[in-house]
Image (cartoon, rainbow, N blue to C red):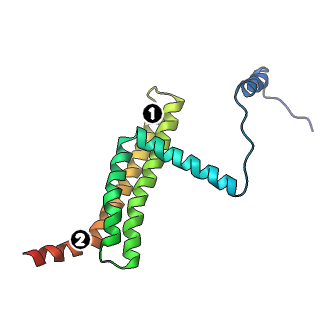
C-alpha cells in the first residue's frame, strides 16, 4: 500500500516543524509515583497564585469564600446541608479558575477581536454566572429559613 502525500501541503512543512521542535526547549521526562503528585500539586498552587495575582473577580470570590466557608461550618444545619453549602462555594472558585484559563489561552493565541474568541470568553463568563446562581440558590434555600426564624425571634 502506497501512502499518497497531500498535494496542497508544501514540501517544506515537515522540515519547518522539525526546525521549530529543535529551537524550542525540550520537555522534561514525565515523573511517576508520589513525586508526580508533588509536582502536580506545585503546578496547582502556581495556577492558584497566578489567578489570585491576575484576576480581580477570583480575588473577590476568594474573599466571599473566606466568609462563607466558616459560616457553613458554624451554621446549625445537617451534615449533608453543610456539604452542599461548602461545595456550592468551591464550585464558584472552580469555574472561575476554568474561565480564567480559557481567557488566558484565548489571549495567548491572539489579542485581536474574533467572533470565536468572544464566544469562548462569553461562555466562560456564563459558566461563572451559573455557578454563582447555584451558590446563591443553595445558600438561600438552606439558610433562608434559619435567617427568617432568627429575625422573627429578634422582633
For image coordinates 12% across by 78% down, the residue present is: 153
Image location (x, y in percent) of residue 89? 38, 60
Towards the viewer: 17 or 6: 17
Q: Name the residue under label 1.
A: 115
Give yes or no for contact between labels 1 and 2 (Cβ–Cβ under 8 Å). Answer: no
Q: Residue furthest left?
A: 155
Structural crowding at the residue carrying mark 2, measured as other residues with C-alpha within 10 Å and reported as few (<14), some (14–19) or many (≥20): few
For image coordinates 13% across by 73% down, the residue present is: 151
Classify residue 27 as left or right of residue 86: right
- Which numbered disc, 1 or 2, marks the residue that appears first in the sequence? 1
Classify residue 152 as left or right of residue 58: left
Q: From where the camera sits, is residue 47 visible?
A: yes
Structural crowding at the residue carrying mark 1, measured as other residues with C-alpha within 10 Å and reported as few (<14), some (14–19) or many (≥20): few
Residue 17 against residue 143 in the figure, above or below? above
**Front: mark 1 or 2:** 2
Image location (x, y in percent) of residue 60? 33, 48
SS at badge 1: helix
For image coordinates 47% across by 41% down, the residue present is: 50
Residue 132 against residue 17 in the figure, above or below? below
Q: From where the camera sits, is residue 138 visible?
A: no
Residue 23 occupies quadrant: top right
Residue 53 occupies quadrant: top left
Image location (x, y in percent) of residue 147? 20, 72
SS at badge 2: helix
Q: State the quadrant of the C terminus.
A: bottom left
Image location (x, y in percent) of residue 46? 53, 44
Towards the viewer: 92 or 54: 54
Q: State the quadrant of the N terminus.
A: top right
Q: Residue 132 carries which label?
A: none
Q: Name the residue under label 2.
A: 144
Towards the viewer: 38 or 86: 38
Amino acid at each position: 500500500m502506497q501512502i499518497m502525500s497531500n498535494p496542497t501541503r508544501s514540501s517544506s512543512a515537515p522540515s519547518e516543524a522539525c526546525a521549530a521542535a529543535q529551537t524550542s526547549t525540550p520537555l522534561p521526562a514525565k515523573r511517576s509515583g508520589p513525586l508526580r503528585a508533588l509536582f502536580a500539586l506545585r503546578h496547582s498552587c502556581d495556577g492558584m497564585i497566578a489567578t489570585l495575582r491576575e484576576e480581580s473577580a477570583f480575588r473577590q470570590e476568594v474573599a466571599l469564600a473566606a466568609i462563607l466557608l466558616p459560616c457553613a461550618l458554624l451554621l446549625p444545619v445537617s451534615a449533608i446541608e453543610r456539604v452542599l453549602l461548602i461545595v456550592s462555594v468551591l464550585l464558584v472558585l472552580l469555574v472561575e479558575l476554568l474561565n480564567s484559563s480559557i481567557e488566558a489561552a484565548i489571549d495567548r493565541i491572539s489579542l485581536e477581536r474574533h467572533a470565536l474568541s468572544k464566544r469562548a470568553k462569553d461562555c466562560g463568563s456564563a459558566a461563572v454566572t451559573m455557578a454563582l446562581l447555584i451558590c446563591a440558590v443553595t445558600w438561600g434555600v438552606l439558610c433562608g429559613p434559619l435567617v427568617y426564624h432568627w429575625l422573627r425571634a429578634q422582633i
